[in-house]
Amino acid sequence: MKDEVRIVSEEFVSHNIIKVTLTDKGNKNDNYHNVSVTVKFEDLASTSLYLNGEYCDSFEFTFEGHAERYTFLEAFKMIVRELSDGTEDRT
């Protein structure tokens, strides 16, 4: 079975512009072998972006493995839930 790779990028504009790229790969038909999720954030304009206390233009992180993919998704759901206050438009 061939590994599947899905790449999705989108730009988000407010008073700043960021680009987020999601790379989701792995063979989901083979017990999720060789699975990884990579998320990359890029400053395209006026974004105060810091990683470990240092300013940066972009950063990315990767979770490898089926369990890691699952726990990342659950953690991300918590982040969205906690940051959402019913106001979607913050422009």
Image: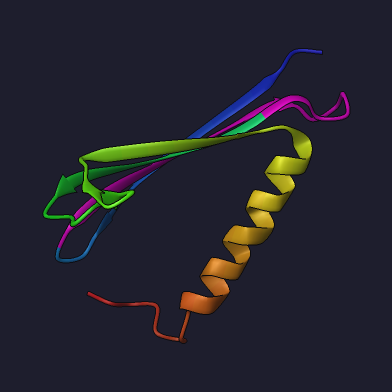
Give the residue drawn at x 73%, y 32%. Answer: 65
Q: Say if 73 sits above or below 28 in the image.
A: below
Give the residue drawn at x 46%, y 86%. Answer: 85
Q: Say if 17 sits above or below 28 in the image.
A: below
Q: How is the image coloured?
A: rainbow
Residue 7 drawn at (x, y percent): 50, 32
Residue 75 drawn at (x, y percent): 62, 60
State the image quarter where residue 89 is shown: bottom left
Give the residue drawn at x 81%, y 30%. Answer: 32
Q: Main SS of the magenta segment?
A: strand
Residue 33 drawn at (x, y percent): 80, 23
* In the displayed structure image, the side of residue 18 where residue 68 appears, left or right: right
Residue 72 drawn at (x, y percent): 64, 50
Give the residue drawn at x 68%, y 23%. Answer: 4
User: Is 49 in front, or is 15?
Assistant: 49
Asked if residue 10 lies in the magenta stretch, the reply is no
Quadrant of the snapshot with the N terminus? top right
Q: Residue extending furthest left?
A: 46
* In the displayed structure image, the side of residue 16 where residue 67 appears, left or right: right
Q: Say if 21 sits above or below 14 in the image.
A: above
Magenta residues span 16-35
Q: Residue extending furthest top?
A: 2
* In the displayed structure image, the side of residue 55 where residue 51 appears, left or right: right
Q: Is residue 49 visible?
A: yes
Quadrant of the snapshot with the C terminus? bottom left
Q: Is residue 22 visible?
A: no
